[in-house]
């Protein structure tokens, strides 16, 4: 009989295999910060086979703060001649609305996408799945305070999975790392049978 932890891991592996069969794409963004008025300054989208579909710097409405620049190294000079999110949105949307979209910490990126719309109408319903939540069940570190599996940062997950790609805080690199983490879960070296309910 499976322990709760082994069952969660088992289910995560099966789910990852199901998702990979859909040939998803992967998305990551870099932003001006974490708050409710921050915006996206870079987006990266990669295909299921690792091909780069989109790699764009985005000019925000307000300058990028120094604290954010220290993390992702995207400067105001780098985005000075870039398009705004509103201009790029139709192109971005074409990639997202016909595929499953894997995101590491999807709640954050989706919130930043909505904020970057700056109140303008935009269809945001997409078939997304959160690789961070899936990896938390796979890794199985219990957080007694929240009563669930502890989320691992993207860099921690990459290190735990012994993936050589860095968590560089650049959108394409981190989308590629997200892809590798999903593949790592799906290819876990253990026998996985069909669900057995205990």
Image: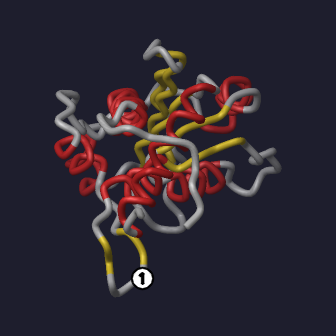
Left or right of 67 in this view: 61: right
Query: Which element type, helix, strand or loop, lies under badge 1?
Result: loop
Point out the residue furthest to the front here: 1
Q: How is the image coloured?
A: secondary structure
* Up/down of 135 relative to 170, above or below: below
Q: How far across and down, in percent of the image, does residue 19 sit?
A: 58, 35
* Up/down of 15 relative to 49, above or below: below
Q: For the image shown, how many numbered marks are present on the structure?
A: 1
Q: Residue at x 44, y 40 (%)?
A: 192
Q: How far across and down, in percent of the image, does residue 20 sit?
A: 54, 28
Crowd around label 1: few <14 · some 14–19 · many ≥20 (10 Å):
few
Q: Residue at x 64, y 27 (%)?
A: 22
Look at the image and tell me in which quarter the N terminus lies: bottom left
* Up/down of 23 relative to 129, above or below: above
Determine which quarter of the picture holds residue 6: bottom left
Q: Is residue 30 visible?
A: yes
Q: Nearer the viewer, residue 18 or 89?
A: 18
* Up/down of 35 relative to 77, above or below: below
Q: Residue at x 50, y 41 (%)?
A: 193
Q: Mark 1 sits on what residue? A: 147
Determine which quarter of the picture holds residue 149: bottom left
Look at the image and tell me in which quarter the C terminus lies: bottom right
Q: How far across and down, in percent of the image, does residue 96 sit?
A: 68, 31
Q: How far across and down, in percent of the image, does residue 127 sit?
A: 70, 42
Q: Is residue 77 visible?
A: no
Q: Nearer the viewer, residue 181 or 17?
A: 17
Q: Nearer the viewer, residue 45 or 24?
A: 24
């Amino acid at each position: 009989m499976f322990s709760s932890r082994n069952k969660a891991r088992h289910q995560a592996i099966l789910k990852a295999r199901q998702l990979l069969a859909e040939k998803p794409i992967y998305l990551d963004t870099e932003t001006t910060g974490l708050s409710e008025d921050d915006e996206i300054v870079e987006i990266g989208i990669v295909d299921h086979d690792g091909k780069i579909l989109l790699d764009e710097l985005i000019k925000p409405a307000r300058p990028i703060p120094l604290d954010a620049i220290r993390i992702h190294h995207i400067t105001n000079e780098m985005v000075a001649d870039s398009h705004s999110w509103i201009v790029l949105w139709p192109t971005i949307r074409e990639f997202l609305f016909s595929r499953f979209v894997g995101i590491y910490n999807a709640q954050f990126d989706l919130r930043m996408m909505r904020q970057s719309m700056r109140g303008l109408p935009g269809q945001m319903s997409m078939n997304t799945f959160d690789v961070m939540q899936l990896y938390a069940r796979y890794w199985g570190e219990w957080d007694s305070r929240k009563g669930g599996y502890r989320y691992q940062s993207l860099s921690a997950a990459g290190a735990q999975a012994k993936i050589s790609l860095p968590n560089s805080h650049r959108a394409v690199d981190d989308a590629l790392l997200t892809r590798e983490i999903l593949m790592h879960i799906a290819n876990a070296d253990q026998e996985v049978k069909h669900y057995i309910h205990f």
